Amino acid sequence: MENLRRLERFSLKLPATIEILSDTEEHDKKVLNLLTANICSGGAFFYTDMPLPEGTSVKIDLVLSIDELKKLDGKQAFIKVNGEVIRTELNGMAICFGRDYTIKSV
């Protein structure tokens, strides 16, 4: 089967906090703490036994160790991005990233 992906994918297990975006009150928000299976600039696949339904809008905080990246101060960098679940499988879900994101070191 031909690989139709246009973006280079990296097999990285990055910790992520995924928050479901909805119109409900702040205290009703569901938050998942997951690991990525792989990631590219357009999205990531997250391991989970209970994937969210396709079309679910989410806010994602990815945590990157920056020990090797001496350009940033601090010990970790957070990438904050919104996305949408585009595919579910038995062992996880694929989330497409939105175009707007922030990167912050702590």
Image (cartoon, grey):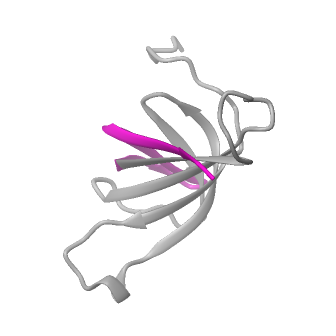
Whole-percent x, y for residue 1 in the image: 54, 15
Whole-percent x, y for residue 83 in the image: 35, 48
Horizontally, residue 11 falls left or right of residue 44, namely: right
Q: Residue sitting at 42 percent across and 63 percent down?
A: 52
Q: Residue sitting at 62 percent across and 60 percent down?
A: 34
Quadrant of the image occupied by residue 4: top left
- Residue lying at the far top in this picture: please name it: 2
Whether 11 is drawn above or below 80: the answer is above
Q: Residue sitting at 46 percent across and 18 percent down?
A: 5
Please tell me which residue lies in front, 13 or 94: 13
Horizontally, residue 81 falls left or right of residue 72, namely: left
- Residue lying at the far front in this picture: please name it: 73
Please tell me which residue lies in front, 9 or 79: 79
Q: Is residue 98 visible?
A: no
Residue 71 magenta-drawn?
A: no
- Residue lying at the far right in this picture: please name it: 67
Q: Main secondary structure of the magenta part?
A: strand
Whether 74 is drawn above or below 33: the answer is above
| Span highlighted in magenta in the image | 83-106
Please tell me which residue lies in front, 52 or 106: 106
Q: Is residue 31 visible?
A: yes
Whole-percent x, y for residue 29 in the image: 37, 79
